Amino acid sequence: MAFLRNRRRRAALALVLVAPAVAELTLGSVPVRMLWLVVLYVPIYGAGVLLIREVVRRTGGGTGALLLMGLAYGLVEEGLALQSLTSPHLYGAAGWGPRPWGINAPYAELNLIYHAVFSVLLPVTLVELMFRDLGRTPYLRRGGLIGTAITALLGVGLLRVSVPPSQDPGYLLPGRAALVILGLAAASVVAALVLHRRRPASSDRPAPGRFRVGAVCAIAAFAFLALLFPFAGAHHPVFLPRAWAPLPMAVAALVAAAAAWRLRRWSAATGWTPRHRLAAVSGALIAHTAFGLVSHTRDPLDTAGLAVIGAVMILLLHRLDHHLATGTPDA
């Protein structure tokens, strides 16, 4: 019993560390020269994603529930804590494309889907593969769950009082917008808790090769990011005029939907294994770090640092794949 409790604690701690590492470090959003900034993100990312995982697994939710909760997470972080979904100044996001109802539309599409996938789904999947003997059982007891919820809430406040005042002074989210964002986040949470989609019917077709799975996820992840995030000196998505931004937005949505549909079909195939899941995760992570090298690094030190982070990430993913292949515990 003590061994099992220790394993659960280690799994919870791993998720607290993996979530901000995947979402911020491996993309280069936090430059190597400013790694100390990760401290600001550990409470909201670490505790927030751990709380999401615990709630979803306790209520029997699967991938769809994690994505919906990830959407709610993105609405809270970007909409309420950073105010970036509506700010006319922060990150220059207002200039990317149209702003219907005062919403930075391309930025919102990019970051809400990014948080659902890279901030929540992928970290939870990685840690569950690392501690696969625990399956989908909760990592925390009631006291730990309450403490995690409090820490996540404090993390929202910490981000709110640290980033907007320094990066976007003078802007305050309108009350009506705050209520709409809260309502959308609450609706996402409710949907995650009550709507449980059935798994697709098992297919007689064999599962595709792991390289193919990883390659498809890598291409989809890189394409999605490149379609929405202005990079290489561009001020609007894919170097198009600002008024044309809805076009790459639509293509990016199709890319995300097609990748999700394909993975759902593949996961029902005969022979789909945890190594296939890891291949999907690895492809997406490697592609998003590659995109970070293209789009997020301007200083040579930051470029070298992100390249080292990417290399270490690949080695760790390879190690996890080896443990999955041999059936030995990784953590």
Image (spheres, grey):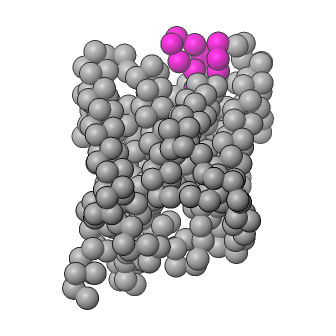
Q: Residue at x 50, y 38 (%)?
A: 211
Majority secondary structure of the magenta segment?
Answer: loop
State the image coordinates of residue 124 (x, y, percent, origin top left): 45, 59
Quadrant of image for the C terminus: bottom left
Q: Is residue 287 left or right of residue 253?
A: left
Quarter of the image for the N terminus: give it: bottom left
Residue 244: where, in percent of width, then height?
77, 19
Viewer-side residue, 55 vs 40:
55
Q: Is residue 107 above or below residue 295?
A: below
Q: Is residue 140 above or below residue 179?
A: below
Residue at 52% x, 74% y: name it.
57
Magenta span includes 174? no
User: Is residue 205 or residue 163 the one in the foreground?
Assistant: 205
Is residue 234 visible in the rendered image? The answer is yes
Total of numbered circles in the picture?
0
* Residue 157 visible, this orientation: no
Q: Residue furthest bottom?
A: 1
Q: Residue at x 65, y 73 (%)?
A: 193
Of residue 28 and residue 330, the one placed in the foreground of this image is 330
Task: Name the side, left or right, on which 174 lies relative to 243.
Answer: left
The part of the image, by quadrant, that contains residue 51 is bottom left
Q: Residue at x 27, y 73 (%)?
A: 7
Image vertical order of residue 79 relative to residue 255, above or below = below
Q: Quadrant of residue 87?
A: top right
Q: Residue 136 location, x and y as percent?
A: 47, 73
- Is residue 301 found left or right of 59 in the rendered image? left
Identify the image quadrant of residue 173. top right
Q: What is the x, y in percent for residue 213?
A: 56, 42
Q: Which residues are magenta?
A: 229-239
